[in-house]
Amino acid sequence: MKADHAKVKRSINIAKGQLEGIGKMIDDDRYCLDIYDQIKASAALLNNAAAYILKEHFRSCVKEAILSGDDSKIDEAFAAMNRHQ
């Protein structure tokens, strides 16, 4: 992975903490919409991390492949995006 490892790990660790907090909220029988909001916030954080990784993939791996005459990385990246829609 060519993306900034520290940046990605920071996002993942924050999401992990949020998920643990959500588990505690459920155990504490907190208000449904408060739990919902926290789940959506965690999902957004993970989506942003995924988008950052994909952007860096295009900037590095795909760019390098194209410059060497191989455009298969473009198809590979789009296939990955389509798997998770």
Image: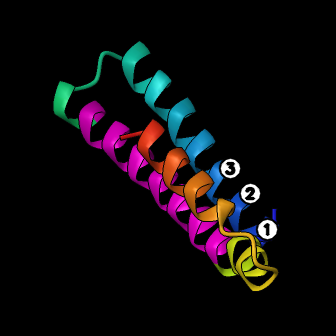
Q: Residue at x 30, y 15 (%)?
A: 29
Q: Are marks 1 and 3 in contact (CB under 8 Å)?
A: no
Tell me where the magenta segment starts and ends, as one range. Answer: 35-58
- Report the predominant secondary structure element of the magenta stretch: helix
Residue matched to label 1: 6
Q: Residue at x 19, y 25 (%)?
A: 32
Mark 2–mark 3 Cα distance, whole angstroms, equals 6 Å
Task: Please provide percent x and percent y for residue 55.
Answer: 57, 72
Q: Residue at x 62, y 73 (%)?
A: 58
Q: Is residue 33 left or right of residue 10?
A: left
Where 71 sits versus 32, above or below?
A: below
Task: Please provide percent x and percent y for residue 21.
Answer: 50, 34
Residue matched to label 3: 13
Q: Amino acid at mark 2?
A: Lys
- Of the two numbered discs 1 and 3 on the same chain, state the one appearing first in sequence: 1
Q: Amino acid at mark 3?
A: Asn
> Furthest residue to the front?
69
Q: Residue at x 56, y 56 (%)?
A: 75
Mark 1–mark 2 Cα distance, whole angstroms, equals 5 Å
Q: Is residue 3 left or right of residue 40?
A: right
Residue matched to label 2: 9
Q: Is residue 50 magenta?
A: yes
10 Å neighbourhood of mark 3: few (<14), some, or many (≥20)? few
Quadrant (top left, top right, bottom left, bottom right) of the C terminus:
top left
Where 69 sits versus 41, above or below?
A: below
Q: Is residue 78 magenta?
A: no
Query: Does dot 3 land on a helix, a strand or a loop?
Result: helix
Q: Are marks 2 and 3 in contact (CB under 8 Å)?
A: yes
Query: Which of 33 and 52 lies nearest the eye of the viewer?
Result: 52
